[in-house]
Amino acid sequence: MNISSDLIPHNQFHLGSWLLPIKNPTWYYFLKKENANNITNASFIESVDEPLKELVCFLHKKGIKTTPSCSGHFRSVEDYEDLYEALEIDRKHIRKEGLELKDIETDKIYLYQDANYKLPWRKKQFLRKVMEYQRKGVLGIRVPEEQLKKKILSLEVEGIQISEKDGIVLLEIDQLNVRDNERSWKKITIAIKNLIDTENMESVIRETENANDA
């Protein structure tokens, strides 16, 4: 299994699944594999960061899949020092009896065991990297219709970078504080909801007109 605890680039989140330790759920591990993002975990939405929940819930209700996400965070160095210690505990389990990990989308359980496993970084290197990395966030959207995809890609929302990769619309963010982060996610949520609701209404009108002309 190609499982990693490293800091995966945000524009690669959709290239696999994210696994959370069952006994010590403090850090997500990345399993690189094909992922259709079929959510079967009934409590999945609890794992979604608060600034993203409204948009993710809306999209799922519309039958639109989302890929693994992160809103971006602003934790202290002290928080990450504690987290590193938790990762050291995980390391010991992985090297001995193994670490049970749960796929957050499907609830599938994996046993990660590697006698030679090492953390990808030493503590100082981890702290230096994670403080910059944590600000970044991403949400991927599997937009089923090409016309709708083009309209989402054409949106302009301050603080949100919108692009397409591997057929998926990526919403990426890198803000310097919580307020701007939450504001940008709120704006893109409103913009996409309005866009999809308008598209649906126009579709209903076209279908009604076509039925009347028939």
Image (cartoon, rainbow, N blue to C red):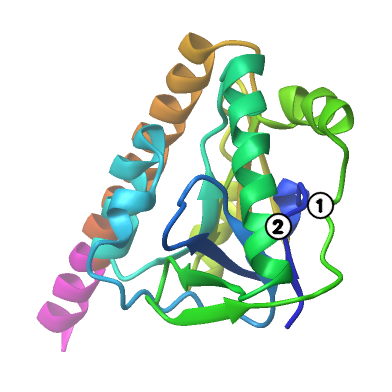
Magenta segment, which residues?
204-214
| Disc 2 secondary structure class | helix
- Rounded to the nearest angstrom, the CA distance separating label 2 from label 1 is 7 Å
Mark found first going from the N terminus, 2 or 1: 2
Amino acid tagged 2: Arg
132 to 26, vertically: above or below? above
The residue sitting at the bottom extreme is: 214
**Residue 23, labelled with which disc?**
none
Q: Does the magenta segment cover residue 213?
A: yes
Q: Nearer the viewer, residue 148 or 165?
A: 165
Q: In this view, does 212 lie to the left or right of 61?
A: left
| Picture residue at 46% right of the left edge, 33% below the top | 188
Please indicate, yes or no, whether residue 167 appears anywhere in the rendered image.
no
Determine which quarter of the picture holds residue 49.
top left
> Which residue is denoted by mark 1 in the rendering?
119
Amino acid tagged 1: Leu
Q: In this view, does 82 lie to the left or right of 123?
A: left
1 to 101, vertically: above or below? below
* Marks 2 and 1 close (CB-CB < 8 Å): yes
> Which residue is denoted by mark 2 in the rendering?
91
